[in-house]
Image (cartoon, grey):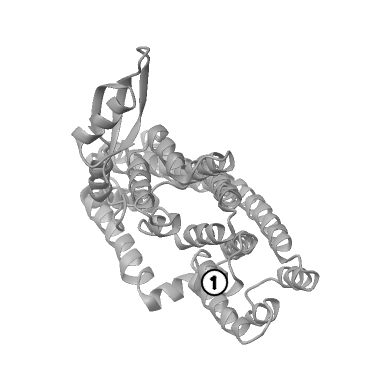
Amino acid sequence: MPVYEYIALDSRGNKKKGMIDSGSLSSARLKLREAAMYPVELREAETRREREAVVAAGVGGGGIFGKVGLREVAAMTRQLSTLLGAGLPLVPSLTTLVAQTANPRMKAILAQIRENVNEGNSLTASMSCFPHAFPPLYVNMVRAGEASGKINLVLERLADFMENQQTLRTKIRSALAYPLLMFLIGSLVLFFLITFVVPNITKIFAEMHQNLPAITVFLIAVSTFFKNFWWGIALAGAAGFLFLRYGIINTERGGYIWDRLKLKVPLFGGLNQKMAMARFSRTLGTLLQSGVPLLAAMNIVKNVVNNRIIADEIQHAGREIEEGQNLSTPLSRSGLFPPIAIEMISVGEQSGNLEPMLYRIADAYEKEVEAGILTLTALLEPIMILVMGLIVGFVVVSVLLPIFEMNQLVR
């Protein structure tokens, strides 16, 4: 049944706003008059147009604009949990969220979910229609909340989980922002220096027809190459990136090689493993605390660790759990989970406090990841300064050496 938004005047002349269900515009107007209200403005709620906006923006598909930001979903989840916890029914809660959501894609999704729920579908079924906004982790937790009758508490845990993930991402990006910006600006300055400045200076040496030092000849050759073929270097770099991304990483075999390399490469390998452990522990603890069965939770968690090698070990552990094993035993045999994490999981299983123990593991590894990234960026900054200083020094020496030789010839 269509939903209409109205602005009407009551018997005292006060302006009222709201929504009303009716079969047609005329019947909606009649309903308002029967309720002693005079409609000033009456129009169909924008669910249809919002659904079209969803399709146009690619929210329901896998396009580049298909995902709604984690921050937006977390904020919506927190607000919905608050409204439901205050005793407001689901449909009015969704209506309130639609009215106050600024993001057009999120607004369109919520409007469609509200319409589906209003037609008798569950919140879980309605959200599962938008997998790029609500991943399996989210949908399964909502399903467990609906089954247990504690949907507001589950949504609160979900909001805590997503906010924690967003905070960790923000800290990592903030720590890497300065070194990356420094590298980018330094590279552009060096490229401009070698491509445009050096040729104008070395042109003088070419006009003098004298023998130049080998270091200066090398600089002139590099500068000439960059000046004539900079476009080829840019195309080669772009082609190499695309080949690495789509020709290797996105293939089955290449993806496994890449994920194994991420765990083995010096400095970064340990960080990648700790990030995977933090995601595994935090996600599994949140799912179990929300009432999701262990086997279903393991099947979800394998998709959030962002590493195929670890995901396969989690899947193998799930099969052994199905056969009667506990969680810590198959994980310990994989060799990818640190002994301290295995020991803490084992203690949690024996004491019946697995979820709190998983949260402790996640907290510990998230702190280690943050500290490791700060240490790494602290090392990268002086290394980049040193490398750029050496390159600039090489350019300066290459330019000044022939000038010194010319001064000696003049004397």
* Numbered-mark total: 1
Q: Position of residue 233 (x, y in %)?
A: 27, 55
Is 278 in front, or is 80? Answer: 80
Question: Which quadrant of the structure image shows residue 106?
Answer: top left
**Residue 366 location in percent, x, y?**
65, 54
Picture residue at 47% right of the left edge, 59% below the top: 139
User: Which quadrant is home to the C terminus?
Assistant: top left
Viewer-nearest residue: 371 or 99: 99
Give the residue displayed 27% in from the left and 40% down from the top: 22
- Residue in view at x 32 percent, y 22 percent: 37
Pointer 1: what residue?
A: 296
Q: Position of residue 135 (x, y in %)?
A: 44, 59
Give the farthest residue toward the top: 13
The amino acid type of the residue labelled 1 equals: Ala
Residue 264 visible from this viewpoint: no
Looking at the image, the residue that sits furthest to the bottom is 323
Could you say whether the residue bearing mark 1 is in a helix, strand or loop?
A: helix
**Of 338 and 240, the residue lying toward us:** 338
Residue occupying the point 38% across, 42% down: 190
Above or below, 246 relative to 229: below
Q: Position of residue 335 (x, y in %)?
A: 64, 78
Within 10 angstroms of label 1, few (less than 14), some, or many (20 or more) residues? some
Query: Is residue 40 placed above or below 332 in the rendered structure?
Result: above
Taking 289 as reference, is 26 above or below it? above
Q: Nearer the viewer, residue 369 or 69?
A: 69
Quadrant assignment, res 123:
bottom left
Q: Is residue 9 visible?
A: yes
